[in-house]
Image (tube, rainbow, N blue to C red):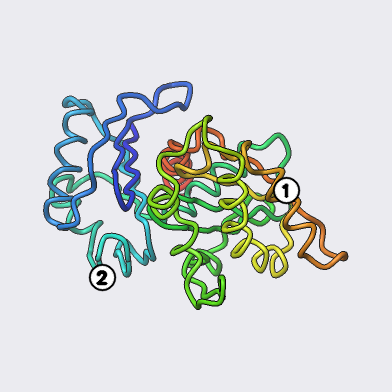
């Protein structure tokens, strides 16, 4: 049994996977910002899901910079240099525990589930924060695993800010209310413009074949993708093609799939 944990800035999902490689027994709870409380809550849910059955691996995604099982920096949780793997291993001492960045896990899972693997795929998660990952020929390279596109500085409407502060799902919800199929067109136009502000320089720099959008906003990609593509076409140099813009498969659970993929890969390599 592989247990996966998607730790978000707002909520955490814990799940096991069935024989068809799909998540089951998903448990959702608000992410505690106190690290000890987080570890205790995750451990409790893992025990509940496992129900005394053997666990082959635990695969955890975190919303920030991760190195060697340590949460080096998770801004939206206020974590810095927290040894998550070591703390969790106290509850599961003989079980492999893999820790990775959430956008990297979601990006890899999204790109690998496309009908054809692109040369370059750019993944963006728009949730509590803005996360990014770059997948080249279906591979996530260690040298690119610390990409934090959401924290790049932008001049937006004459103010220096970060992409996350204008396009994160929590920001959009605060400004426009709960997004839904009834959200007016003019709101989607403004949302597309905010996403374009950070996406345009990333496309110019990486020139991806496809952009995959996940997180809570990714659910609604079809409502603004054409608008976003049009804005990019107007503002990018003619020599740079506008990539295809799509929603992540199962955008609110795609991190769990990435955690599962990572565990399978790590177990195979060991």
Residue lying at 50% horizontally and 38% vertically, measured from the top left: 251
Using residue 253 as the reference point, say whether residue 142 is left or right of it: right
Residue lying at 23% horizontally and 48% vertically, measured from the top left: 31
Q: Position of residue 242 (x, y in %)?
A: 78, 55
Tell me, yes or no, if residue 270 can be seen here.
no
- Please say if 114 is above or below 157: above
Viewer-side residue, 81 vs 248: 248
- Please say if 129 is above or below 78: above
Tell me, yes or no, if residue 125 can be seen here.
yes
Give whichever of discs 1 and 2 has the lower sequence position.
Answer: 2
Q: Are the two marked residues, 1 and 2, in contact with CB atoms closer than 8 angstroms?
A: no
The crowding category of the residue bearing disc 1, from other C-alpha atoms within 10 Å (few below 14, some 14 to 19, many at least 20), is: some
Using residue 2 as the reference point, say whether residue 221 is left or right of it: right
Residue lying at 87% horizontally and 64% vertically, measured from the top left: 238
Viewer-side residue, 69 vs 154: 154
Residue receiving disc 1: 118
Viewer-side residue, 229 vs 207: 229
Q: Quadrant of the N terminus?
A: top left
Q: Position of residue 175 (x, y in %)?
A: 42, 52
User: Mark 1 or mark 2, which is nearer to you?
Assistant: 2
Q: CA distance from mark 1 to mark 2?
A: 35 Å
Say what secondary structure mark 1 lies in: loop
The crowding category of the residue bearing disc 2, from other C-alpha atoms within 10 Å (few below 14, some 14 to 19, many at least 20), is: some
Q: Position of residue 87 (x, y in %)?
A: 17, 56
Q: Position of residue 122 (x, y in %)?
A: 63, 55
Residue receiving disc 2: 80
């Amino acid at each position: 049994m592989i247990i996966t944990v998607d730790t978000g800035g707002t909520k955490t999902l814990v799940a096991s996977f069935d024989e068809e490689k799909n998540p089951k027994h998903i448990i959702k709870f608000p992410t505690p910002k106190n690290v000890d409380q987080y570890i205790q809550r995750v451990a409790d849910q893992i025990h509940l899901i496992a129900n005394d059955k053997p666990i082959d691996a635990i695969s955890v995604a975190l919303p920030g910079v991760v190195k060697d099982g340590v949460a080096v920096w998770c801004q939206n949780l206020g974590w810095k240099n927290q040894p998550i793997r070591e703390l969790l291993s106290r509850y599961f001492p003989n079980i492999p525990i893999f820790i990775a960045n959430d956008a990297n896990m979601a990006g890899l899972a999204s790109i690998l589930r496309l009908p054809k693997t692109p040369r370059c795929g750019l993944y963006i998660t728009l949730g509590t924060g803005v996360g990014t990952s770059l997948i080249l020929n279906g591979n996530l390279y260690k040298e690119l695993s610390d990409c934090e596109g959401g924290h790049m500085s932008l001049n937006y409407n004459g103010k220096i800010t970060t992409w996350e502060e204008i396009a994160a799902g929590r920001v959009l919800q605060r400004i426009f209310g709960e997004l839904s199929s009834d959200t007016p067109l003019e709101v989607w136009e403004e949302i597309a413009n905010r996403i374009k502000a950070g996406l345009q320089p990333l496309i110019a720099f990486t020139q991806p074949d496809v952009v995959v959008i996940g997180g809570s906003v990714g659910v609604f990609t079809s409502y603004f993708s054409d608008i976003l593509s049009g804005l990019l076409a107007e503002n990018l140099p003619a020599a740079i093609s506008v990539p295809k813009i799509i929603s992540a498969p199962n955008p609110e659970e795609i991190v769990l799939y990435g955690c599962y993929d990572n565990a399978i890969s790590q177990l195979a390599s060991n």
